[in-house]
Amino acid sequence: MALTIDTFILGPIDNNTYLLSDKTSKEAVLIDPAAPSMKIAQHIEKNNLSLKQIWLTHAHFDHIGGVRWFLDRYGKDIQAAIHKDAVNLWKMGGSARDFGFDFNPGPLPKIIISDNDILKIGTTEFTVLHTPGHTPGHVTFYNAQDNIAFCGDVIFYHGIGRTDLAISNTPNLMKSISQKILPLPDETRLYPGHGQFTTVGEEKNNNPFL
């Protein structure tokens, strides 16, 4: 694998924030920075990494809480990427009001992505898979060469994403799992937004919600 994957657990809901770095070019990408984090910043700087982009699986407040902080710290050349159907949730403050507080995530991300778009870090390509249900603009970032997928809150180890929220949709979530996640090779490692990593095969065989 050309990439190093570091996991940082951030915020009050124990979100997984992933730092991907290319071993050769030292380019780095953050996935779902849940909160400001000096620990991540120190890791980036200690390892001479060059943060290029921030990729967001969706726009709930607990997945975007650190975006503005990292953009401010690493300069205007760093851009965030979000699905086109997640724009409204971003503008609504990531549904923070549903949990009793206000949140301003800052300016809208500059990179608007759609299903089957390609994002790159170094020489490694990730395909954007639109996986709505938990939110309308939820995506999964999938690399076929290394069989890895960053799946946010679509599917977890022996669990699935919440659909009891105002903008959630259970049939759409199950469709996303059945049409976009389960067809991936069984050995594909799934990196979720919360909890431990799992594999497609493990969830096919042992997920009680499927």
Image (cartoon, rainbow, N blue to C red):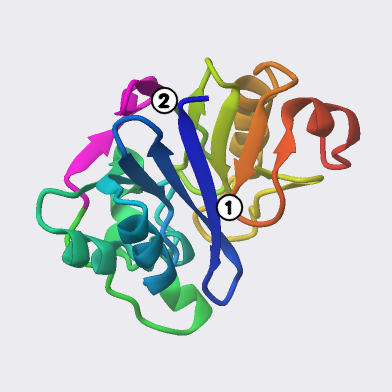
Q: Which residues are magenta?
A: 109-125
State the image quarter where residue 174 is shown.
top right
Residue 126 in sight from this viewpoint: yes
Query: Element at badge 2?
Result: strand
Q: Nearer the viewer, residue 43 or 145?
A: 43
Residue 60: percent from left, percent from top: 45, 60
* Measured Cα–Cα span from mark 1 to mark 2: 17 Å
**Which residue corresponds to mark 2?**
126
Label 2 crowd (10 A; few <14 / some 14-19 / many >=20): many
Residue 104: percent from left, percent from top: 27, 73
The kind of residue on which mark 1 rests is Gly
Q: Nearer the viewer, residue 86 or 24?
A: 24
Contact check, label 1 and label 2, Cβ < 8 Å:
no
Q: Relative to 51, say whether 8 is above or below.
A: below
Sequence order check, earlier mark of 1 and 2 = 2
Q: Which mark is residue 193?
A: 1
